[in-house]
Image: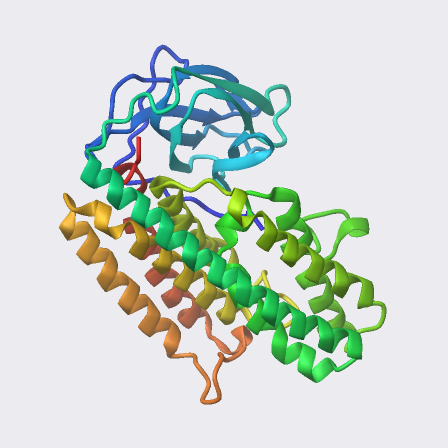
Amino acid sequence: MRRLRVVAAGAAVAIALSGCGSSTKTGASGGSGTSARKIAFTLTKAGCDPAHLELPAGATTFDVKNDGADAVSEMELQQGGRIVGEVENLTPGLSGSFTVTLEPGTYQTACPNGTSAAKGDLVVTGVAGSGTTVASASAALAATAVTNYRAYVESEVAQLVITTTSFVDAVKAGDVASAKALFPKARIHYESVEPIAETFSSLDENIDARANDVPASTFRGFHRIEQQLWVAGNTAGMAHDADELLSDVKRLQAFLPTVKLEPAQIANGAVELLNEVASSKITGEEDRYSHTDLWDFEGNLEGAKAAFTAVRPLLGKSPTLATTIDRQFTSTRDALDQYQTPGGGFVLYTALTRTQTRGLAAQVEALADSLAQVPPLVVAG
């Protein structure tokens, strides 16, 4: 589920222009030889500010700040009902950013819970491919990054279908012990590709919503079955939910070819995955019944690493940053591995002390801060 705290990209400084939030200035040149225009965006009690915006096509970094809006904490950029970029869990005073390559057309902005400007629009002018300045060699690197990451996502979702099938079979057979053992093994594959799944927001809700994320009448998916397994201790009434879960996972697999990917989007996803660990999962609220949160941590960490590995060749002009991130991935993985069990998997999250969870959070936050500098450097247009 989309419930992340997004840290501000170190290279993305908000630039306001006459209160409208736009700027024609560009950011630092990226590894592909391009620059990202920067747009200042504010979350207010009303919602999105600006609510209406027109921009030329090209690479764009949205710098979003919450200006005292207690009820409004996220901003989404959508097109055709799909999320192409977002920041979330921005409580008053916090800032975040994401970078996308805008193609001509009409986009929608959404700042849920705004009183009068919860939705807005963004009109992008120009012709397809306008603003693209990448050299052929860099364009080839960008294409390779997309190909490699797409292959990773497809492999993970294929494993998700296999492991979810086994999980569903156990649930429908009433085999509580097997279902409990299979639950985290299936979810780890979903967690690794969650930014892609989130582009299909309703499907993500069906698969991964927690009890308080949706109305009780629509609560389904992994966490509804988790609740039944660990709270009730049985699988009574879960056959239909299990069938729906498997159907939703297979729908996700079928939709993958329709997902448009670009390097900045892939890099944004790496940041999202780690922010999810640092803000949401670190509280133990994700797998609140099973306490198998460390499996999710691993999925998020490995998914973020795969995303970074895909775009790393585009950081040719930022070798120090790339080396720092490599080192941080290793140290964060080492920190997580302390809690592995001899037979595979991890100890329950409730076995960790507060000091240990804070230590994990510090490792992940430092890595996320470094990764947040990557999206503006790998824009493809």
Name, please, the residue furthest toward the right: 237
Q: Residue 168, relative to residue 99: is it above or below?
A: below
**Residue 252 percent location from the top left of the image:** 60, 52
Q: Nearer the viewer, residue 362 or 123?
A: 123
Q: Tell me which colouring the rendered structure shows.
A: rainbow
* One can see residue 283 in this view: no
Q: Write down the quadrant of residue 13 in the picture.
A: top left
What residue is at 73 percent from the left and 81 percent from the top?
176
Name, please, the residue furthest toward the top: 18
What residue is at 36 percent from the left and 59 percent from the top?
306
* One can see residue 275 in this view: yes
Q: Write down the quadrant of residue 138 in the picture.
A: top left
**Residue 141 percent location from the top left of the image:** 25, 45
- Residue 137 as seen in the image, left or right of residue 287: left
Q: Nearer the viewer, residue 112 or 146?
A: 146
Q: Residue 248, relative to residue 289: is it above or below?
A: above
- Residue 149 as seen in the image, left or right of residue 165: left
**Residue 227 percent location from the top left of the image:** 72, 67
**Residue 173 percent location from the top left of the image:** 79, 79
Q: In this figure, what is the number of numbered marks?
A: 0
Q: Residue 351, relative to residue 3: is it above or below?
A: below
Q: Quarter of the image containing the C terminus?
A: top left
